Each structure stands twice: as C-alpha cells, then as structure tokens.
Image: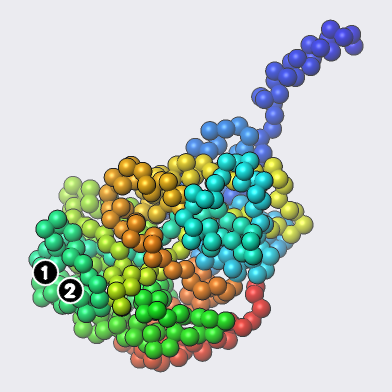
C-alpha cells in the first residue's frame, strides 16, 4: 500500500470513527411501574437520544419482594443488570451481603455529578463506611390528602382554602369527628390483610414520640408502639374509617368523594391530579404534610428511589459502564422536575429551589416541610421496602386496626415472628 492510500484510509477512519464507534449498552432493571414507570421511560429515552456513547435498555419487573429476590439471585449468579432502581431503605441489607458496587469518585467527577447538591440525609443514607453505593433520585413520604368540599363542611378549612393546622392526635380525632357529623367517611387507608400502610404510619408515630422501633436487632418501641397502634385502631372502632379496604379500594373511596382524608404516599399525586382535572367528576383536593400526632413532632416515614450498581459475581462493572451510569444519574438530576411530576421530592436540591418546582400544583404544599422531617426504616437486611419486617407487620397490624386482634396481642405476635429472623445472618 502506498503512502497516499494509507493516509487516505487513516483520514477516512478519523472521519468515520464517531459514526462506527459502538455504543456501550447498559442493562437497567427497574421496579417502577404505572406513572413512575412512564416517567422513567421518558428519562431513559431522553438520555439515549441526548448522547451517542451509551444506550440504556430497560427491563421492568414487578414491584417489591419479587424484584429484590430476582435481583439478588441474578447478581449472585453473575447475570444481573449493570444498574438497578432500588430503595435507599435496602442499602444496609445489600451492603451486608456485598451486593452492590461502590461508586467511585472518579466516575462522579467524570460525569459532573456533585454529591453536595443532593439532600444531605439522602447522600448519608447512600453511604456506608465512607463508600457511596447509590445515587438518590427522590424522597417519597406519607402525606395527608383532603377533600376540600367535605372538610369545608366540617369547618376545617382556613380562609385561604387550606386545611387548618392539625398539631396533635386530639386535633386529628376532633377533625374526624366533625367530618363524621357531616355524614361522610373520615379517613381512607388500606387495612386489608398484607397492607403496608399501617406499618409505615405506626413507624412515623413512634418516631414522633421520640422513640425508636429497633436498636441492635432488638425491638425497643415499648409503650410508644402501643400508643401508636391504639391511636390508629381508635379511628376504626369509632367508625371514622372503613374497615378492611385494600389499597385500590381505599384510594377509590377517597377519589370518588366519599371520604374527607386519605393517608397515603406522595406517589398518588398523579391520580389526584387526574381526578382534579376530570371535567365530569372533578374533586377539589389539597395535600398537607403528615400531622404531628405526638409532641408536635412531624417525623414521617419515607423512602427514596436510587440508582445502584449490582455487584455481579465474577463480572465487576467496568469503569466505562460505571461512568455511563453516573452520567445517566446526572441527566436525571438535570430533569428532576419531570420526576417530580409523580409527586416525588427530587433528591437534587437545586431543583426544589426553582420557581418551576414551587409553581407545581400540590407538590410544593408538602415538599419543604416533609423533606425536613423524614425518617428511614432502621438498618438491617430484613428492613426496607417490602422486606421481611414489613411483610410480618402486614400480617398482624391490619387485623389490630379493624378489631380482629387486640392491639397488644398484634404487637406481641409481630415481635415474636420478626424476632425469629432478625438475628439471622444477612441474606
């Protein structure tokens, strides 16, 4: 080959290289369905078209224990994805079994990801022994939804059309009684067998009393746990709430205008917005932070979605792929308002301070107050979203609220069953 042809080929290679350069594919497993799933799909598609170095391919799995079981099994066999959506409440369990890859400072810097712009509590929750294991994208907490027409009749709205402050359990009970006098149902909350909501509210109430649920793998909730359970059971024994509703039925009861309040997560904001814009059956709905039932303390159960890198056995993540994953997390931060449309409070703090976020309907009514008082579940492999602890509570707590089981007996049975696995090695 003469020199002229060689230079020509080199020049062509230089010109063509960006075109023929293979993209790095990132396999992404997620448990996000419904509105969350649609928004994440948009973010992934936006990232894929925003650059040509990486392509994310998404696999959506069923939420909860099926997702985590499959993720852990696949990872242990070296066949897990490059990245996954997990809950920050699962971090302590994953790290106890070496289930996640630590994310390097080199990757963070290479992707212009600034941890200082993430809400400090979330970054702290993502970090174990000085190493970061996840990139948070949101906080989702319990809130109090209210039907303005019903609570107005009960005299519970202020002059601005907002719910008057409820700063104690006595005030909330009085509000429910006032609603009952109007003929409406006071409260919608799931209490069918295997419902998670009673445990989340119970956990919030314990922290509001300044107590803890678990310390050193031992239950320590004591009298605070009993008071919390009795408080919730009282709402049902007094006829303020409909007994035995499953999740879907409880949201339907509220969204069809039959109840004044709904205790649920911020993830129901899209459904509420849809109902508020329904021209035929529009409801006027407000949202407030979870009331401070005890001691004026507004502590509230919450969890967070995050992007993490499974530690696939025998197949450590490459530096190139880790950089791509962090770049995607940076992209999500830059488009945090898209994610916030699902009701979530963005983990990226600058997004919460924008005028666009403050102008979002409903979300800004609870975001700041809630973000300042969130509490995560206690550390432990058994803890976190849809974990064994929540599953055990869901066997007994709904029965206690609906009067099928004495509250003290329910707590004893929960403590007995959970105690059997809490001291086992992490798995």
Query: Could you say which disc has been placed on residue 154 in the image?
Result: 1
Which sits in the foreground, 98 or 41? Answer: 98
Left or right, 94 with respect to 273, comes to right
> At x 38% / y 69%, what residue is drawn?
300
**Residue 186, picture quadrant:** bottom left
Within-10-Å neighbours for mark 1: few <14, some 14–19, many 20+: many
Residue that protrudes farthest toward the right in the picture: 1
Residue that protrudes farthest toward the front in the picture: 116
Which sits in the foreground, 78 or 408? Answer: 408
Q: Would you place residue 309 above or below residue 51 in this image? A: below
Residue 39, visible in the rendered structure = no
Q: Position of residue 320 (x, y in %)?
A: 69, 42
Marked residue nearer the N-terminal end (2 or 1): 1
Q: Secondary structure at mark 1?
A: loop
> At x 31% / y 47%, what residue is drawn?
358
Which sits in the foreground, 79 or 122? Answer: 122
The alpha-carbon separation of the residues under discs 2 and 1 comes to 8 Å
Q: Position of residue 130 (x, y in %)?
A: 63, 61
Q: Position of residue 321 (x, y in %)?
A: 67, 44
Residue 370, visible in the rendered structure = yes
> At x 10% / y 72%, what residue is drawn?
182
Q: Are marks 2 and 1 in contact (CB under 8 Å)?
A: yes
Q: Would you place residue 250 above or below residue 412 in this image? A: above
**Quadrant placement of the N terminus:** top right
Q: Which residue is mark 2?
A: 175
């Amino acid at each position: 080959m003469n020199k002229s042809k060689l230079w020509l080929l080199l020049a062509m290679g230089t010109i063509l290289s960006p075109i023929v350069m293979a993209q790095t594919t990132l396999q992404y497993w997620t448990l996000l369905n419904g509105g969350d799933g649609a928004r994440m799909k948009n973010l992934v598609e936006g990232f894929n078209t925003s650059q040509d170095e990486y392509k994310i391919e998404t696999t959506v799995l069923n939420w909860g224990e099926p997702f985590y079981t499959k993720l852990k099994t696949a990872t242990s066999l070296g066949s897990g994805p490059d990245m996954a959506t997990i809950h920050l409440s699962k971090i302590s369990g994953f790290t106890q079994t070496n289930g996640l890859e630590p994310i390097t400072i080199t990757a963070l810097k290479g992707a212009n990801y600034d941890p200082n712009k993430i809400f400090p509590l979330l970054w702290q929750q993502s970090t174990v022994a000085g190493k970061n294991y996840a990139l948070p994208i949101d906080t989702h907490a319990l809130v109090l939804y209210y039907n303005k027409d019903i609570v107005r009749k009960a005299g519970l709205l202020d002059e601005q059309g907002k719910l008057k402050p409820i700063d104690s359990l006595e005030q909330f009970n009085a509000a429910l009684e006032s609603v009952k006098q109007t003929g409406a149902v006071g409260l919608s909350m799931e209490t069918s067998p295997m419902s998670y909501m009673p445990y989340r509210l119970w956990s919030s109430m314990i922290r509001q009393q300044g107590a803890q649920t678990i310390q050193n793998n031992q239950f320590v909730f004591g009298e605070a746990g009993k008071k919390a359970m009795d408080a919730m059971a009282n709402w049902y024994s007094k006829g303020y709430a409909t007994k035995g509703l499953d999740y879907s039925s409880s949201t339907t009861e509220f969204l069809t205008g039959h109840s004044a309040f709904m205790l649920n997560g911020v993830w129901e904001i899209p459904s509420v917005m849809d109902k508020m814009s329904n021209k035929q059956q529009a409801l006027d709905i407000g949202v407030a932070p979870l009331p401070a039932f005890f001691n004026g303390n507004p502590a509230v159960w919450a969890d967070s979605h995050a992007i993490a890198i499974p530690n696939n056995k025998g197949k450590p993540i490459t530096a190139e792929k880790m950089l791509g994953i962090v770049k995607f997390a940076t992209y999500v931060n830059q488009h945090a308002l898209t994610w916030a449309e699902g009701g979530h409070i963005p983990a990226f703090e600058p997004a919460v301070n924008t005028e666009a976020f403050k102008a979002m309907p409903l979300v800004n009514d609870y975001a700041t107050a809630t973000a300042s008082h969130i509490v995560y579940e206690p550390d432990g492999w058994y803890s976190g979203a849809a974990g064994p602890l929540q599953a055990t509570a869901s066997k007994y707590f709904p029965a206690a609220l609906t009067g099928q089981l004495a509250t003290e007996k329910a707590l004893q049975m929960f403590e007995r069953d959970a105690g059997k696995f809490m001291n086992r090695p992490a798995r």
